[in-house]
Amino acid sequence: MKVGVHVPQWGSDAGRDGVLSVARAAEEAGLDSVWVADHVVYPLGSQTKYPYGSGETPFAPEEGFLDAFVTLAAIAGATERITLGTSVLVMPMREPLQMAKAIATLDVLSGGRVALGVGAGWWLEEFTALGAPFEARGRRMDEQLAILRALWRDGRLSHSGEFYDFGELVCEPRPVQAGGPPVLIGGRGPTGRRRAGRSGDGWHALGSHDETLIAGFADVKRVAREAGRDEGELMLSTSAGLPPDPERAVARLVRLKRAGVDQVVLNVPDNTAAGIREGIERLAESILPQVREA
């Protein structure tokens, strides 16, 4: 099971020193990946509730929020091996050609180290501020994904679809990874699982409840079989908290591994650079060795 951590993307340590110190610590400790989330603006007076936990966003307006692609580009230049991931990139609030170019560029400049967790998004007011329709965002995401993959595969494309229409064009360079980075579809509900089974390289779930993950991934694989795809090639990934208690942390990771999770993206409760680095140290020195033994 591969293990990664989120970098400090908001708050007092969301700057060059904080982000790069965490990324370098993760690489030096032998972790597999570092991850960023995706928000562009924080709409004040929003009526949309955060869909997880207490319903309040984990970051405040005044804390800022570093851009996903620019942050990963900075990390790419400061590291050599570690995978650079999005958990998750909100595709429908972005324009697909610019997105295809940015992701391909990041993959080229990082030497083929990009991995994408993507989602349809939840924040209505953020979509509105960016001029992106909130309605039918799932279908728009499906079309975007088809555009990205065609461009990454062939380097040129003409397209006429429900939401996007353009004549033949070239979008080079293509990613280092043949066909583009792996795309894991996020979402806890049945729609996200169906999309993962139909068109994703895997499912990027949320949480650490092993029974939920097992049942959800079985649903993803069923959809893949019905679509004529090879279910054995799909990855199960999840984003989960790292418990501060070492015994609980070991138990949680062992359960995830036994549930068939291929990759876990960990959120350290202390979102400071020092707190995340301390979590990385605990992972490398005591938690992961016990997980391997178990």
Image (cartoon, grey):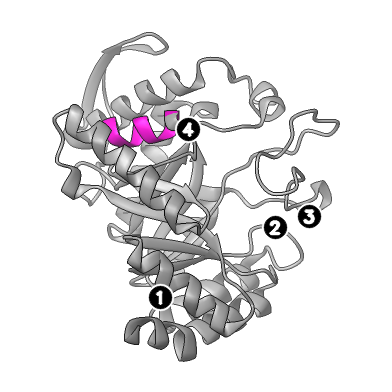
Residue pointed to by mark 4: 91
Of the residues tagged 3 and 1, which is closer to the observer?
1
- Looking at the image, tell me whether mark 2 or mark 3 is earlier in sequence order: 2
Tell which circle, 2 or 4, labels the residue nearer the N-terminal end.
2
**Residues at badges 2 and 3 in contact (C-beta under 8 Å)?**
yes
Q: Which residue is mark 1?
A: 31
Tell me which numbered mark, 2 or 1, is placed earlier along the sequence: 2
User: What residue is shown at x 76% (from left), y 66% (from top)?
Assistant: 12
Pointer 1 with pointer 4, Cβ within 8 A: no
Residue 106 to residue 166: above or below = below
Q: Residue at x 33, y 87 (%)?
A: 293
Magenta residues, dominant SS class = helix
Q: Is residue 278 above or below residue 205?
A: below
Residue that numbered label 2 is attached to: 10
Q: Earlier in the sequence, mark 1 or mark 4?
A: 1
Q: Disc 3 and disc 1: Cα gap in Å?
A: 27 Å
Residue 224: say if magenta.
no
Which one is in front, 54 or 153?
54
The amino acid pointed to by label 2 is Trp
Check disc 3 and report the residue beneath it: 63
